Every structure is written in C-alpha cells, then in structure tokens.
Image (tube, coloured by chain):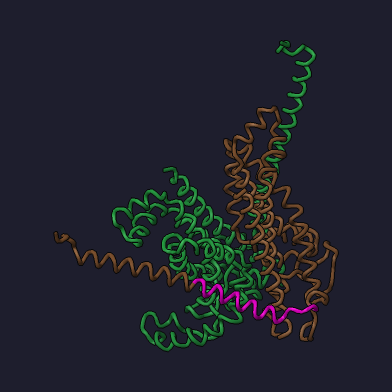
Amino acid sequence: MSNPLPSSAQAAHFLKTAERQRTQDWLFHRLTQVFSIMVLLALAGIIVSLFINAWPTFAKFGARFIWYVEWDIINEEFGAAIAIVGTVASAGLAMLIAVPLSFGIAVFLTETCPVWLRRPLGTAIELLAAVPSIIYGMFGLFVFAPLFADFIQVPLRQVLGGMPLIGFLFGGAPNGMGILAAGIVLAFMVVPFVASVMRDVFEITPPILRESAYGLGCTTWEVVTKIVLPYTQKGVIGGVMLGLGRALGETMAVTFVIGNANRMPTSLFSPGTSIASTLANEFGEAADFHMSSLFALGFLLFIITFMVLALAKIMISRAEKAKGF
Amino acid sequence: MAMNMNHSLYRRRRLANLWGIATSMLAMTLGLTVLLWILFVLFSNGFAALDWNILSQDTPAPGTEGGGLRNAIVGSLLMVGLSVLVATPIGILAGIYLTEFGDQSKTAALTRFVTDIMLSAPSITIGLFVYAIAVATVGRFSGFAGSLALTLIAVPVVMRTTENMLRLVPGSLREAAFALGAPRWKVSLSVTLRAAKSGVITGVLLAIARISGETAPLLFTALNNQFFNDDMSKPMANLPVVIFQFAMSPYDNWIRLAWGGALLITLTVLVLNILARVFFRDKTTS
C-alpha cells in the first residue's frame, strides 16, 4: 500500500493550486456581482437623470405641478393634472374591465376546462400576452374606434346622456376616441397578462385543500370562491397590480385612441391624454422648458409605476412564501 | 329512508355554481374572441400588404405610391442584434451571481427585486433616460442610443430567466463537481450553465421577442430615418417607429405598409415565443 500522505513538494503544489483557484473564484464572484449591480445603477440613473432634467419645472412650479390644471406650450404654463387624470382614468377603466374577465379566464383554465384543452388554451393566452402593444393600438384606431362610435357611444348617449347625475359622463363627440375607448383597448392588452398571472397563482393552491373541499361536497364555484381565492388572495391582488402597472405606463396602445387633447376630460367619451401619450406626441418637437416639463411628467410616471409594481411584487412573493404547506 | 335534505339551500348552491361557471366560460369566450379578432384583423390587413417590395424598397415619401420597409427592417435587425449581443453576457453573468452567490446577500435580494420591477417599468421612461444620457450629450439621435435603450429592457429578461433556469439544476450536480475539486467559477460556467443551456437560450429568445416590438423607447433615441442607413451613429429607421408614424398618417399607402410591418413584427415575436417554448420543453422532458 502506498503512502496516503502527499510528499511536502506535492503539498506545496496543492496549496498553490488552491490559492490560485481562490483568487479566480474571488474575481469571478466580483465580476458577476458588478454585472448584477448594473441593474441597480440603471435604476438610480433613471431616477436621477429624469429628476435633473425635470428640475427647471419643479423649481418653477414646486409640488403645485402635480395638481396644476394647465398645459400651455406657448405661455410655458405646465401642470401634470390633465395627464395624470387621463393616465389614472384610462388605466382604472381598463382594470375594471380586465379584472373580472381575467378572473373568469383563470377560473376556467384551472377548474372547468377539460384537461386536454388546458395546455393549448393556456399557451394561447400566454402568446397573446407577448403581442407587441403597438398592434393593440392599431387595432384600436382602425377597427375598434369606428365600431365603438357607432354601436356604443351613440346608443349610450341616447339612453343615458339625458339622465340626471350620470348624464354628463356620456357627453362629447362620438368619434370613437377618448378615455373610455383607450381604457377598453388597454383592457384587451392586459387581459392575457393578468389572466396568466392569476392562473399561475391559482395553481399554487395545494391539491389536497381543493380535493378535501370537493370531498365535502363543495361545488366548483364554492371551491373557487371559498378555498382557492382566499388562499391565493395576495397573489391575485399582486397580479392585478402588475397589470395596473403595465396599463399606467403603456404608450402605444393608448396613444392611438385616447384622442390626444390637452384638456381636462369631462366625460367618458371626451378626448384626453395620458403621461405616456403626451411624451410620445410632444417630446420630438419640444425644447428647453417644455422639454423639462415633459421630463417632469416622465419622472412622475416612473415613480407612480415603480410604487405600484413594487407593491405588486411584495404581494406576489408573500403569496409564494405562504405556499409552504 | 328519505334523505333529510335542505332542498332550497341545495338548489341555491347549485344555481350559484351554474352562474359562476357560466360567467367564467363567457369570460373565456369573450377574451378569446377579442384576441382572435385582433389577430384576424392583423393577418388579413397584413398579408394584403406583404409583397417583395416590402423587403427590397425603402420607405416611400408621404403621399407617393409603392415603396417598402427595407431601411426599417435593416435598422431594427441591427439595433436588436447589437442589443442582444450586449445584453446576453451581462444578463447571464448577473443571473449566475443571483443563483450561485446571492442566497445570503442583501444586495442580491435587492437586485432581484429591482430587476423584477424593471421587467414591467414603463419603456417610455427608459427612452427618456437614454435620451438624457446618450442623445442630449452627443447632440444627435443615433442607432446606438436606440440599441442602448433596448439593451436596458433586454438585460432583466435574460437575467431573471437565467436565474430561474440555473435554479432548476439539481444541487447534487454542483456538489459532485465541488467534490472533484473544481473551483466555483468552473462549476458555474462548465457545469451548471451547461446543464441549463437550453433554458438560458429560452431567456435570450424571449428577450429578442420582447425588444423586437418595443416602440416607445426608440421614439426619442433612434428616432427615424427616411433613407437607408447602416451607420449606427446616425438616426436610424426601425419597424416600430415607422409603423407608428405611418399608421397615424392620412396616406393610404403608408397605412398599408404599417399593417405589413405590424404583421412582420408580430410573426417574429410569436415565432420566437414558440421556439423558446420548444427549447424549454426539450429541457424539462429530457
């Protein structure tokens, strides 16, 4: 039997190899770390550079910029209120439509859909979530807006336009453009996205819980509303907020149909503008102070969506943690 | 023996169930109808506009007939290509950091969180950012600026998919490599990364699909160019911005070309997504 202990020359050699490898590992660790920290730097860079470029506007108007109802390029009077209202209203309407639809789709895909259809339908929904948003915008402009004007705006205005209290919501020219039209097109865009997130969250419900409920004689609807939904509550809210974050920051699907008017919208049909669509329309021709006001809008948009998305992320990760059953 | 059953309660529960299932089916039908309708409109208008001129001629002047999208297609390919070349190594190395070194680190947790947010951050603000650092400072719009904006969008996609795929590699494989005395970098690059290869390719394909259709970040960075241009330091035509400009115009010929371009982009994105799925399925079943 040979001597298991290495000679001193061999030991020195091993030690040197180990040391070399340790340096290499240290370098590799730091190198990969630098690349991952670049994401943090990008985030900081975005916030800082938007803020610096927006500074002239913030210096002139202060916090009043946020609720100042004016967007006058010639007299250089700028406020974000019109664009913020347009953004929040169109995204809010979109979620009002998209949430029940996505919920229905997710329930169908996880509970009632025949097993052989589950995969193809689920994949179809996921693929549709990948369709570029400009396609939704073009569809909105060329196909949806004319139909919306003839079959929704005109009848709604005739039936509800004269009603007290809510009648004013349906005023305005029925040309197919406006806040509601933008909201509906946005809803089409976020449905596949929210539905696939919801389906994923529903699927983390432990089968044992579901099966016990069925075993006790629960109906499918009772299993969904009393077992799956309470269990996945946080994830569902997170998914909805993820969709909201997308809708708030969406440019292309909105710009085509919102009407692009720098006026405070007075009804669901009146043209308006969102932060993203104002940027898309005006930035190319803007200069100096106008440009700084556009940067200020961009800064506000980034902060709003950042908060919504951060909250969404926290909700979803909590839901996933609770999965440990 | 007669069952002692509360018939009215039973009926009510059954009705609620029926109602719930019916509405969920209705939602599914409605959703699918709208989405198929969008695809139908896109395909019928798009195929009507497709001909060889789209590939061989440049964008026409306003109000003129004919023309194609050659300059825009080439511009998009160049910018997307460069972005992918830059974003892939960055994304993969950053993803390796998150899986192999990032389990106890607070920085890694923060990076992961921020990356997830950047995945859905409004792309138009990324366009603003790149305008501020790469257009305003240089004094002109350029293909490079457009490419930088797309890179910023692609990196988080590659990073998060790489991380998720590396996590699927069984720990025993890592331990076996360590037991043979391999250093960490070798284990990461030649064992785990190789094992997760198809998953990482999935991530790269998804990133290409994601940036191919992005319009907003290119509006203020690459801008547009009426003429053929392969110099990336100058303003560059690209499909999404050309589609945006043409679709909003009053000229029928431009609108026709916009549909053609929209179809090209959507087909690219769908094919890439399907390829990504095929790659990933190969990995999970083998």
Work out which quarter of the rendered image holds the N terminus of chain B and state it.
bottom left
Residue sitting at 72 percent across and 81 percent down?
Answer: B49
- x, y percent for residue A308: 51, 57
Furthest residue to the front?
A: B1
Between residue B101 and residue B245, name the one nearer to us: B101
The overriding secondary structure of the stretch rendered in magenta is helix
Count of numbered labels shown in the rendering:
0
Residue A16 drawn at (x, y percent) = 77, 21
Residue B52 falls within the magenta-colored stretch:
yes
Name the residue nearer the viewer: A271 or A160.
A160
Task: Name the quadrant containing residue A304.
Answer: bottom right
Q: Can see residue A244?
A: no
Q: Is residue B210 found inside the magenta-colored segment of the image?
A: no
Q: Residue at x 48, y 74 (%)?
A: B30
Check the image and report above or below for B157 versus A290.
Answer: above
Please provide percent x and percent y for residue A200.
49, 55
Give the residues drawn in magenta, as a range.
B31-53
**B20 up-or-down from A158: above or below:** above
Give whichever of A70, B9 is nearer the camera.
Answer: B9
Residue at far left of view: B1
Is there any visible trace of residue A100 in the rendered image?
yes
Chain B rendering hue: brown
Q: Quadrant of the rendered structure where residue B167 is? A: top right
| Side of B253 relative to A146 (left or right) | right
Q: Is residue B84 above or below residue A21?
A: below
- x%, y% of residue A287? 72, 68
Residue in the image at 70% along x and 27% along y: B181
Tell me what hue chain A is rendered in: green
Judge left or right: residue A209 versus residue A27: left
